[in-house]
Amino acid sequence: MDLGFGLALIGALVILVLLGVHIAVALFGVAFAGVWIIRDNPALAMRLLSVSAYNGIADYLFATIPLFVLMGLLVSISNVGKDTFEVAEALLRRLRGGLGVATVAANAVFAAVTGVSIASAAVFTKVAVPEMTRHGYRKAFAAGTVAGSSILGMLIPPSLLMIIYGVLAEVSIGKMFVAGVLPGVLIACGFVAVIMGLASFAPGYVYQEGRAPLAGATDSRPAMPLSEILTKLVPIALLVALVLGGLYTGFFTPTEAGGIGAFGALLIALARRSLGGGKMWRVLTETGAVSVSILILLIAAGFYSRMLSMAGVPTAIGDLVQSTGLGAYGFLLIYVLIILFLGMFLDSSSILLIMTPIAVPIAQNFGFDLIHFGVVTVIAVEVGLLTPPFGISVFTVKATLADPTISVEQVFAGAMPFILVMLAALIAIAAFPWLSLALI
């Protein structure tokens, strides 16, 4: 098959998704039609679909997904996000922009046990935005800070996007998790620097008119007792240390880490009496719904990837890129720009499912380390959570906030500094692979 046919199939997939067809249905439909047309054999397309459905998620590794989803939901229902923010606020409120810094810090900790940006956005919209507004921050900046820092949920491990990439690219999920730590810390530090810089040099962007704190002013509220800090922070700190420590040292496989993490989160939820009134049943049913939706997407993506290979699309695109003389980083630049463009219209999972099967073979031919390539991919995809017109994290914050005085456009504007930090981090990590590979 020629490259034009392959590109037509990819274009058909993107158009179907933009028209509102569910990404799994679009992947199955395009892949089935592609195999049928390529081999002129609908029976073969059906057999390949059945093989993909069985082999696609038969591996023990796929137990990682429901276990980490369960851990994240148990942690969310235990008010860990609220407690983490309160501790960060108590420790950081004397800094310029301290509540914004506390939001980033709490989101970073929360990200290390949930792995879902949307969960972070919903939790901290309820917790941080009212508190920041009460202390004189502009609502738009407060909402933008929550939306911006929520993306840490998909970068700092465990991350569902990294699991999806690891499965699609056939690389170690444990190594992907470890590779995300340093970039996640780097981006979080960049967010902190931007917040403190804006609070110091452009207070009108951060604070409501006349509410900026005076130079040298101190917070008169009593300090949080050490015993309360430990009560709120130690359980989640132990859970993070257990999961990430086990992964980093190689003591746990990703699946085992998910099981240990889910059990630890269950103990925290039980200790805090957070599972009464049918909440445990809701957690289990939501875990099943989220996990099944992800696993169906992975089956569909596997079928789509087989169809692309059968059509010779990755090879044809790779040959085309090499013939243009762009080189490895020229290819990487075009790839990132395409992802950023798709991020304006599609959600993160859809972009990964469409682009990874095409790009990974080409990246491998150019000599990229697929772990480093995966981190760059995830960061680029995460930028899409903040960029208009789709910006799902921004819309999540807006919907959760339910405040008619704040428009979506204002939240996008409040998130703009965080988008710039992420783009700067993306360039740095793409240019210096050791930033993602140093801990592996």
Image (spheres, rainbow, N blue to C red):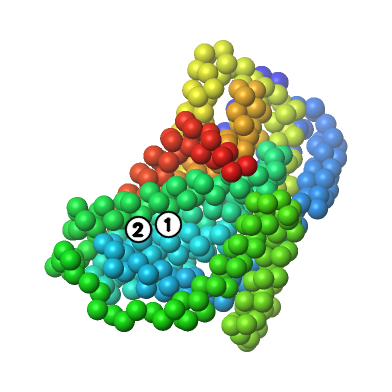
Q: Tell me the element at label 2.
A: helix
Q: Earlier in the sequence, mark 1 or mark 2?
A: 2
The residue carrying mark 1 is 149
Residue 48 at x, y percent in the picture: 82, 39
Residue 38 drawn above or below residue 424: above
Rendering coords of residue 73 (x, y %): 61, 69
> In this rendering, is residue 175 above or below 108?
above
Residue 25 visible, this angle: no
Nearer to us in this view, 381 or 17: 381
Q: Few, some or many C-alpha atoms within 10 Å of disc 2 (few <14, some 14-19, many ≥20)?
A: many
| Residue closest to the eye, 270 or 394 | 270
Residue under label 2, please give it: 144
Quadrant where the N terminus sits is: top right
Q: Amino acid at mark 2?
A: Gly
Question: What secondary structure is found at the residue carrying circle 1?
Answer: helix
Query: How many angstroms separate mark 1 from mark 2 (CA)?
Result: 8 Å
Please identify, in this view, whether the residue under mark 1 or under mark 2 is nearer the observer. 1
Could you tell me if the residues under marks 1 and 2 are in contact, i.e. CB atoms within 8 Å?
no
